[in-house]
Amino acid sequence: MLFASAVSRELHAAEAGRALGESIQGVLGDGPVDLACLFFSSHYADRTKELSLAVREALNPRVLIGCTGEGIIADAEEIERAGAVALWAARLTTALMTPFRLSGGQEDQGFMLSGWPDEISRLHDSPTLLLLGDPFSTPMDDVLSRIESYCPGSTAIGGMAGGGRDMGENRLLLDADVHDEGVVGVAISGPVAIRSVVSQGCRPIGERYVVTKAERNVIHELGGVSALERLQGMFESLTSHERELAQNALHIGIVMDEQRNRFERGDFLVRNLIGADRTSGSVAIGDVISEGQTIQFHVRDAQSASEDLHLMLAADKAKYRKPPLGALLFSCCGRGRGLFGRPHHDVTVLRERTGDIAIAGFFAQGEIGPVGGTNFLHGYTASVALFSEPGD
């Protein structure tokens, strides 16, 4: 397997596409390109077909997917406020790939999803799904839930397109077709290993509690005591620095595997704390919660986010013998320079931990990745797909 990435700031779409194709070809040579991913800023939105055509003429990839992003990531750069386009390409030998486009919405009988290829559900091995969606038109939580019913055990990694400010302004790319809504993706299986690293950028504080009374996304009691009373007690136990963080960025971490003896970073699904009711003593979070689940409060800041990404990538390196050969990085548009105070943070950490490999991605309006074996849509997260030779 071979991987290559390239970036261009050329604003003429066709010229940028040709230059990217030539750069990729210089690395991969004259052999086939199986998968190409094209990520581009909104500067190219009206010329997506022109950009796509130039790339396809240069490389003739088996599958081409792509989308607009709030910023573009390639090689060692995160380009956040300028026109840029990144191309990532892979030669995956005999890997099986099935491209698809999904669309869905609420109907009388509930959420309906169209476009799912039946052949993916019939695969012997659970595939990895690379997903790119439009946040204005796509209830991605519903999409992921329906995909799980169609293809249990599959791993979904990707991000929600950015750059647009309203319905119809983002672009999704699947081969020669350009869309402004829905989801595009590709299912990959066979002799290629694709590992996921999901860094939610938080650290736990205080004690863990069992949810003893809850209704949908509202927690009424934690360990038999009102949720707000538990929250206030936790807050009083913090240091002054932690209190400051909690006032600005307090979250809830939901344990995903209750059978574990100890819980660490990566064992929690982090969700926003969105409100509290002093009269009832309840708190509301940004997800459905059930009685019997274990939670812990979390805080997020630049240091926690940096440490978490380092730790998650270090854990992957310690667990797997085969080093990654290429990577796709989907980083929240709330990270980057705005969070870390300096550019290129996530891609720099990724390169420090994986070496000089082909990397591309974009700043997303929501990141897709698994936690505890279940696929979720996240915020403020860095979701990474690491490609390597098959085997541990």
Image (tube, grey):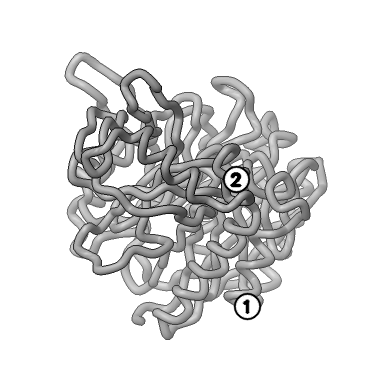
Label 2 neighbour load within 10 Å: few <14, some 14-19, many 20+: some
Q: Residue at x 25, y 60 (%)?
A: 126
> Which of these two is toward me, 256 or 27?
256
**Residue receiving disc 1:** 355
The answer to which of marks 2 and 1 sits earlier in the sequence is 2
The quadrant the C terminus occupies is: bottom left
In depth, the one of 329 and 171 nearer the eye is 329
Identity, as a three-letter code, of the amino acid under mark 1? Gly
**At x 65% / y 62%, what residue is drawn?**
347
In percent of width and height, residue 219 lies at: 29, 33
x, y percentage for residue 8?
77, 53
- The quadrant in which residue 102 appears is top left
Helix, strand or loop at disc 1? loop
Q: Is residue 164 above or below residue 292?
A: above
Can residue 306 be seen in this snapshot? yes
Residue depicted at x 27% and y 50%: 294
Q: Which numbered tag is attached to residue 129? A: none
Q: Nearer the viewer, residue 258 or 278?
A: 278
Q: Locate residue 39 relative to residue 324 in the image: left or right.
A: right
Three-letter amino acid code of the residue under disc 2: Leu
Frontmost of labels 2 and 1 is 2
- CA gap, disc 2 and disc 1: 33 Å
Query: The residue tagged with tag 2: helix, strand or loop?
Result: helix
Residue 65 position, x and y percent, is 51, 47
Q: Which mark is residue 245?
A: 2
